[in-house]
Image (cartoon, grey):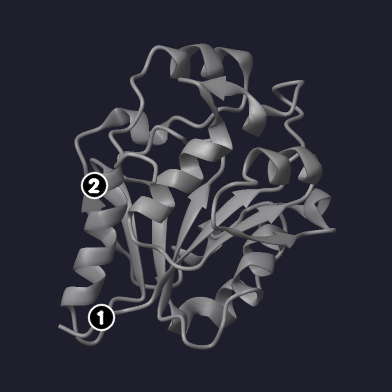
Amino acid sequence: MELKKIAGIILAAGGSTRMGVPKLTLEWHGSPLIHWVVRITLAAGCSPVIVVTGANAGAVEESLAELPVQFAHNPNWENGQSTSVRTGIEALSKDVDAAVIMLGDQPQIPLNVIQTLISLYGEETPPPPILATAIGDKRANPVLFDRAMFPVLTGLEGDAGARTIFSRYPVQLIPFDNPDLKLDVDSPEDYRRLMELPPPVLPPKD
């Protein structure tokens, strides 16, 4: 099986308006939320890992200072999530075969979810254009995009992120029996729910 180069793009540019405070630097099991997301993405074997910043960029970068990530700043983050997707894709080198797009406020995503997407992607020839996690028949995050989809992703507009793509291109849904995949931390109530969850099992830090 040909070894594929899979990048990780972590969307971390939002203004946390519903939370009221910069949510990505909130603590969860001893580390900021964004710190957990980066560690999960790195542990899954994604390289490079691009963190797209916008609002609160300094605090996000400071919280990740010791981790091997690249930062791509999105000055247009207020124009919607699509601008962050575009920023992340445009930061990739030409030798990247696919990218896993992660949300910066989902630190509870199990490592095996990302590993499964990457493994299934590598097993198929030709590779599927889009692999997405699912709970039942409902799509969830993260999502893996083959590089054939990169021009489409850079053409997105507005706050829909990559969602508008799913009705126009074939999506292979990978079911997981884990309702926590749908949780993202948009409000204080979401954060309280997150605090009740255990952290992902990750390899020890070097």
**Along the viewing direction, whichever of 187 and 116 lies nearer the viewer:** 116
Seen in the picture, residue 83 relative to 10 is either above or below; the reply is below
Q: Which disc, if any, is residue 51? A: none
Density class for disc 2 (Cα within 10 Å; few <14, some 14-19, many ≥20) is: some
* Left or right side of 188 for 168: left
The quarter of the picture where residue 205 lies is top left
Q: Position of residue 33 (x, y in %)?
A: 55, 32
Q: Identify the amino acid type marked 1.
A: Leu
* Left or right side of 64 for 173: left
Which residue is located at x 58 percent, y 72 percent? 153
**Along the viewing direction, whichever of 136 and 37 lies nearer the viewer:** 37
Mark positioned earlier in the residue sequence (2 or 1): 1
Q: Which residue is identified by label 2?
A: 112
Residue projecting furthest to the front: 206
Q: For the residue labelled by badge 1, is the local secondary structure a helix, a strand or a loop?
A: loop
Disc 2 vs disc 1: Cβ atoms closer than 8 Å?
no
Q: Which residue is identified by label 1?
A: 3
Q: Position of residue 145 (x, y in %)?
A: 42, 70
**Along the viewing direction, whichever of 127 and 169 lies nearer the viewer:** 127
Which residue is located at x 16 percent, y 75 percent? 123
Seen in the picture, residue 133 relative to 129 is either above or below; the reply is above
Which residue is located at x 65 percent, y 73 percent? 91
Seen in the picture, residue 150 relative to 179 is either above or below; the reply is below
**Along the viewing direction, whichever of 60 and 109 lies nearer the viewer:** 60
Q: Identify the amino acid type marked 2.
A: Asn
Work out how far the residue at label 2 is from the one at label 1, CA to CA, in angstroms.
18 Å
Q: Position of residue 199 (x, y in %)?
A: 36, 26
Q: Position of residue 81 (x, y in %)?
A: 67, 53
